[in-house]
């Protein structure tokens, strides 16, 4: 391929030079009573094999965490081949019966499944287009367990795939800690199995005295701020949400772990209950019975008894400690995002050193532990400690064309726009400014900032008048201020610039709902902190965004594959599904964006709600029919559809392939039949050819330069345009593309899986080049981005879902009042983008 340089790289994959040499047998495990907590199941199985029956379970088997045990010999069970029962105690009482706290019966029996043989793995890596059958899938699951078992046992804070340690932890705002750890996974590649190891970060509930943690959650300066006596108080509700189901130890029973079932409003010291037939207070009880005087009797209490308990058991908050290592699975609050990014960022060479040895925090890489793992050793496995070196390709970037004959050649994924005229500058005549950050952004600063913005816009070729209206407010009722502007101007408004104070997410949500949904008026929000630090580069970035929102374009790539596609009508699509956070009963959001111009630079977006956690786009057929019909209203029907799908896990890829490709094809068939019946297309017009590509962002492949050609010499990353196809999966046609250059830390690549290709005859080089070109059409950046622009846009559309709900709906978990998810309710509540002045056909999501 023209414009391609061969380079050498290293990756964070390590070859398994010797696969398991032993056969493994599968046993079924049943716990009585059931154990809902994964860590407790692991402890029970560990005690069974080490303390209860060590001679039977030697060598030890690997437990999958739920109900299967894999072991390299047949067990000589007391009950014979029919199975056996063992009693396992986690506590110290040797006479406690099964069913009492910490005492379990473990039933074990051999399954009817076939023996797992090493040959099952050899078949999987033998060649391309392999299919994972049941035996191969079971063998792969066993291989993952063998690799992970020792490190997960040594580190109780783990999620199965990654383990974490508090060495070098960082406490951040909101009662959260950041821990470091390692991800490890076995992956099949062409001709070999590899172990992929990567550094990881986990958010963990802050541990320690509950009183201290509560102050950090609320940002309180004094314990007096915890004297919460109203259950409707937002601060009290915030604490309830943070501490619900957290594990604690309490005074005086420090050895026992308790679960927080709720909080009791203060003053807890005066909470009255009946003890031995007489009334007493919690403060008196702890002083008289346990000789513990309460230091903070005016604060809240902790409920540690469940709903079925005969009476409530309440402990003052000051006598509770949060147990370390409880994973925080919610979305991080906005105030914590910056700290998390800084904590997780590592230079590529530092990352590889941590993977290969020991980090500064003392957390040992699993690579070091494989040599001493009894499970790896028993299986006969050997893992090479040297990272795999690969041959790769470096694609030449497309030149960026500005106004006239002005062309810029990108340098490692970026290009300069200074002193250049935009390719398609737009006009900004009727516009206004609203300042909600009046505490910091004064009238003088606002005027100076708008003067600089206007000057930059005019220099790049835009026609800009002075703003027709400038208003000030406190953000308490942003709709009122915006409506006043709308009525005062009384003409079509091009744009309203809104200056927001710090941490003003709620104001921004209401502004975007007003503009996108209610009135179809573009709004552009500027943050106070960036406004105060603004320089010429900042105002240039704002000008690029404003011009794009107005339908303009600052530059376009001079492409090869896109130019070939332009010989016939084509449509580039991007789609994504975003899910609500854990514990939320809100819906998932599905989005579809599609190009409608010859340069694949302008996109129209659709979105919808669907059942939470549903990975498949439920209404894709109808969305695609609407998209193709809309495309055809200004163009001939598309001859080609290139569909990029984001947000698909590897486990869901086959289902997506089976259902979504059929949905797209059926959309074309139905629409072609409808248009033929209405004589809108020729009877012999063929159906569009479809190429369907899944782009996976959350993978753990990391690539580092191994020669000077690909080294960017600033950050230690590989240069933008890196293509890796020597780490190919035997299961699919795939490649990695690192299309951007990270400013700091380690650059991330996209993992592209081609599930169907009818347009390029499986010429992977063309798809690689097309994907790289599409990383240069993103309307808001002067750099190539990490994934193709339509995929990025689909992400952005999903992220804006909260703007489609009114305040009361967005704050709701399930306003229907039913425990079951009510899709009809959410579909009614999800308001569409305004169609006024064709606003819904513009790139409102920028």
Image: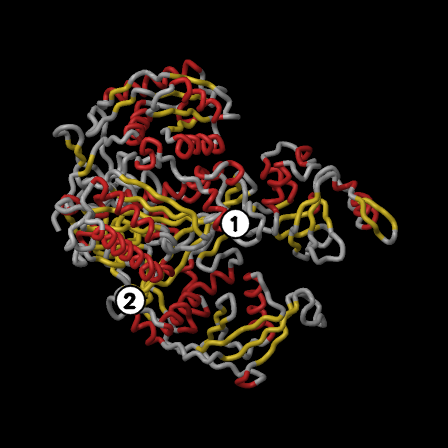
Residue 457 place in picture, x, y as percent: 27, 22
Give the colour scheme shown: secondary structure
Residue 710 place in picture, x, y as percent: 22, 46
The relative height of residue 779 versus residue 539 in the rendered view (above or below) is below
Seen from the viewer's position, the closer of residues 845 and 319 is 845
Residue that label 2 marks: 192
The relative height of residue 35 versus residue 509 in the rendered view (above or below) is below
Q: Say the numbered circle drawn on residue 576.
A: none
Badge 1 crowding class, 10 Å Cα cut-off, few under 14, some 14 to 19, many 20 or more, is some
Residue 620 place in picture, x, y as percent: 34, 52
Q: Secondary structure at mark 1?
A: loop
Residue that label 1 marks: 585
User: Is residue 331 toward the left or the right of residue 433 in the image?
Assistant: right
Image point 38% across, 19% down: which residue? 490
Seen from the viewer's position, the closer of residues 792 and 509 is 509
Residue at the extreme right of the image, as rendered = 277
């Amino acid at each position: 391929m023209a414009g391609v340089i061969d380079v050498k790289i290293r990756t964070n994959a390590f070859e398994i030079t010797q696969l398991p040499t032993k056969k493994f047998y599968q046993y079924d495990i049943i716990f009585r009573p059931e154990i809902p907590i994964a860590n407790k199941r692991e402890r029970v199985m560990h005690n069974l094999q080490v303390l209860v029956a060590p001679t039977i379970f030697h060598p030890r088997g690997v437990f999958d965490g739920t109900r299967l045990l894999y072991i390299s010999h047949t067990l000589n069970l007391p009950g014979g081949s029919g199975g056996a029962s063992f009693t396992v105690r986690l506590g110290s009482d040797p006479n406690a019966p099964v069913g009492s706290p910490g005492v379990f019966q473990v039933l074990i029996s051999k399954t009817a499944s076939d023996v797992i043989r090493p040959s099952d793995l050899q078949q999987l890596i033998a060649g391309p287009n392999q299919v994972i059958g049941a035996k191969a899938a079971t063998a792969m699951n066993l291989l993952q367990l063998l690799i992970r078992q020792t490190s997960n046992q040594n580190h109780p804070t783990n999620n199965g795939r990654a383990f974490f340690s508090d060495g070098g932890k960082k406490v951040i705002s909101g009662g959260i800690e950041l821990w470091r750890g390692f991800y490890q996974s076995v992956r099949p590649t062409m001709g070999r199995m590899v172990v992929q190891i990567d550094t990881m970060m986990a958010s963990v509930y802050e541990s320690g005295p509950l009183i201290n943690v509560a102050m950090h959650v609320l940002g309180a300066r004094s314990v007096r701020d915890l004297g919460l006596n109203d259950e409707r108080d937002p601060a009290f509700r915030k604490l309830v949400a943070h501490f619900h189901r957290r594990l604690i130890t309490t005074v005086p029973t420090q050895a026992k772990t308790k679960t927080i079932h709720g909080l009791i409003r203060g003053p807890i010291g005066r909470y009255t209950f009946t003890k031995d037939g007489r009334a007493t207070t919690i403060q008196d009880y702890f002083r008289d019975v346990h000789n513990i005087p309460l230091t903070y009797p005016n604060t809240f209490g902790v409920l540690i008894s469940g709903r079925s308990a005969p009476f409530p058991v309440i402990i003052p908050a000051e006598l509770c400690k949060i147990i370390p290592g409880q994973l925080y699975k919610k979305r991080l609050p906005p105030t914590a995002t910056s700290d998390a990014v800084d904590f997780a960022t590592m230079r590529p060479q530092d990352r590889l050193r941590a993977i290969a040895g020991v980090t500064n925090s003392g957390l040992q890489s699993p690579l070091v532990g494989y040599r001493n793992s009894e499970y790896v050793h028993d299986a006969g496995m050997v893992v090479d400690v040297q990272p795999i070196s690969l041959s790769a390709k470096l694609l030449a970037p497309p030149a960026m064309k500005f106004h006239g004959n002005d062309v810029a050649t990108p340098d490692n994924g970026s290009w300069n726009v200074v002193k250049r005229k935009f390719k398609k500058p737009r006009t900004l005549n009727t516009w206004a400014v609203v300042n909600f950050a009046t505490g910091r952004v004064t009238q003088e600063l606002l005027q100076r900032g708008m003067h600089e913005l206007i000057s930059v816009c005019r220099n790049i070729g835009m026609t800009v008048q002075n703003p027709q209206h400038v208003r000030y407010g406190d953000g308490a009722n942003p709709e009122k201020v915006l409506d006043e502007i709308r009525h005062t101007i009384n003409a079509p408004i091009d744009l309203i610039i809104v200056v927001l104070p710090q941490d003003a997410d709620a104001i921004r949500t209401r502004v975007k709902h007003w503009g996108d949904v209610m009135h179809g008026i573009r709004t552009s929000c500027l943050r106070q902190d960036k406004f105060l630090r603004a320089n010429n580069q900042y105002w240039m970035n704002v000008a690029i965004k404003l011009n794009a929102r107005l339908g303009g374009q600052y530059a376009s790539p001079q492409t090869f594959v896109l130019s070939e596609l332009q010989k016939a009508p084509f449509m580039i699509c991007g789609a994504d599904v975003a899910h609500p956070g854990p514990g939320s009963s809100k819906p998932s959001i599905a989005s579809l964006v599609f190009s409608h111009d010859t340069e694949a630079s302008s996109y129209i977006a659709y979105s919808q709600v669907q059942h939470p956690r549903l990975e498949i786009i439920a209404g894709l057929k109808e969305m695609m029919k609407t998209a193709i019909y809309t495309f055809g209203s200004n163009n001939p029907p598309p001859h080609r559809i290139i569909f990029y799908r984001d947000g698909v896990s590897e486990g869901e890829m086959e289902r997506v392939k089976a259902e979504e490709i059929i949905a797209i094809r059926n959309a074309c068939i139905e629409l072609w039949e409808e248009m033929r019946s209405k004589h809108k297309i020729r009877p012999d017009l063929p159906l569009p050819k479809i190429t369907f590509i899944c782009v996976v962002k959350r993978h753990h492949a990391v690539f580092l330069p191994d020669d000077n050609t690909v080294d960017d010499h600033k950050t230690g990353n590989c240069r933008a345009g890196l293509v890796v196809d020597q780490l190919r999966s035997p299961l699919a046609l795939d490649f990695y593309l690192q299309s951007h250059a990270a400013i700091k830390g380690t650059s991330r690549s996209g993992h592209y899986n081609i599930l169907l290709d009818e347009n390029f005859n499986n010429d992977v080089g063309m798809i690689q080049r097309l994907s790289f070109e599409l990383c240069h059409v993103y309307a808001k950046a002067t750099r190539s981005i990490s994934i193709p622009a339509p995929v990025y846009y689909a992400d952005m559309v999903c992220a804006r879902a909260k703007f489609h709900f009114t305040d009361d709906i967005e704050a709701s978990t399930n306003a229907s009042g039913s425990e079951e998810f009510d899709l009809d309710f959410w579909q009614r509540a999800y308001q569409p983008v305004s169609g006024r002045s064709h606003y819904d056909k513009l790139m409102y999501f920028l």
